[in-house]
């Protein structure tokens, strides 16, 4: 059983046009707060990012924002967070997010959201962390992406055990349960240091 004291959420800085995505983001923040799970995220007050922070803060949850200096504009950054960290660049931001989190959840978003998801799952594949990685597939948003990943498995570019590092659910409670019960695979043999 994994202790999920903090979860990093990757999601869009836009709201998109699906009201279900907006409401689920708020609900995820709310449920995390009520379960005493700290929200770690990109520190914005706009878009889906703002909605999840609002859901957590409205329910007295702890919210940690991490933002690179060049994005720290008054109209973007949320100034009502429990903690706010500023980094020099995007890579340091992701390092700090990983360091502060017991797991990860990806909500709908754009290029930046996908980049964060794929970097964190690549780190897991390489054995750099063994934390659960969830994908909240609201309204089938990620169906096409999952189809692509399945095609990568079929064509021999992605191992099934690495595909299975991604925990996919369309329900928040089921996703959190699966993340708590996630058992990470062993570090690949080729990554283990040789004994001398």
Image (cartoon, helix red, strand yellow):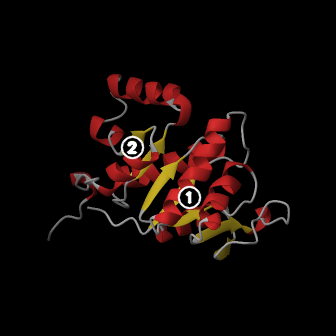
SS at circle 2: strand
Residue 109 visible within the image: no
**Residue annotated with mark 1:** 30
Q: Are marks 2 and 1 in contact (CB under 8 Å)?
A: no
Residue 3 visible within the image: yes
Q: Is residue 104 above or below residue 144?
A: below
With 130 as the anchor, is 111 left or right in this view? right
Residue 146 lies, in percent from the top left, at 45, 30
Residue 137 lies, in percent from the top left, at 50, 37
**Which of the pair 139/126 is nearer the observer?**
139
**Disc 2 versus disc 1: distance between alpha carbons?**
23 Å
Quadrant housing residue 165: top left
Numbered circles on residues, count: 2
The 10 Å Cα crowd at callout 2, few under 14, some 14 to 19, many 20 or more, is: some
Q: Earlier in the sequence, mark 2 or mark 1?
A: 1
With 87 as the anchor, is 183 left or right in this view? left
Q: Is residue 16 above or below residue 150?
A: below
Q: Is residue 133 above or below residue 1?
A: above
Q: Is residue 82 above or below residue 130?
A: below
Which residue lies at the image location 67% right of the left edge and 74% below the top edge?
84
Quadrant housing residue 56: bottom right
Say the numbered circle drawn on residue 163: none
Which residue lies at the image location 59% right of the left edge and 71% below the top edge?
60
Which residue lies at the image location 26% right of the left edge and 61% below the top edge?
1
Say the numbered circle drawn on residue 166: 2
């Amino acid at each position: 059983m994994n202790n999920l004291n903090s979860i990093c959420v990757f999601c869009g800085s836009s709201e998109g046009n699906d009201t279900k995505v907006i409401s689920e983001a708020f609900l995820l923040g709310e449920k995390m707060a009520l379960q005493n799970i700290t929200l770690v995220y990109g520190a914005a007050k706009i878009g889906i990012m703002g909605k999840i922070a609002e859901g957590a803060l409205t329910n007295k949850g702890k919210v940690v924002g991490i933002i690179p200096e060049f994005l720290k504009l008054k109209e973007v950054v949320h100034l009502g967070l429990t903690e706010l960290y500023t980094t020099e660049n995007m890579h340091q931001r992701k390092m700090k997010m990983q360091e502060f989190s017991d797991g990860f959840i990806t909500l709908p978003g754009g290029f930046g959201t996908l980049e964060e998801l794929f970097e964190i799952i690549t780190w897991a594949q390489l054995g750099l962390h063994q934390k659960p990685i969830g994908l909240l597939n609201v309204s089938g948003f990620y169906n096409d992406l999952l189809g692509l990943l399945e095609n990568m498995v079929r064509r021999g570019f992605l191992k099934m055990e690495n595909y299975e590092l991604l925990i996919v659910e369309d329900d928040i409670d089921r996703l959190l349960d699966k993340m708590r019960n996630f058992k990470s695979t062993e570090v690949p043999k080729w990554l283990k240091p040789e004994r001398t």
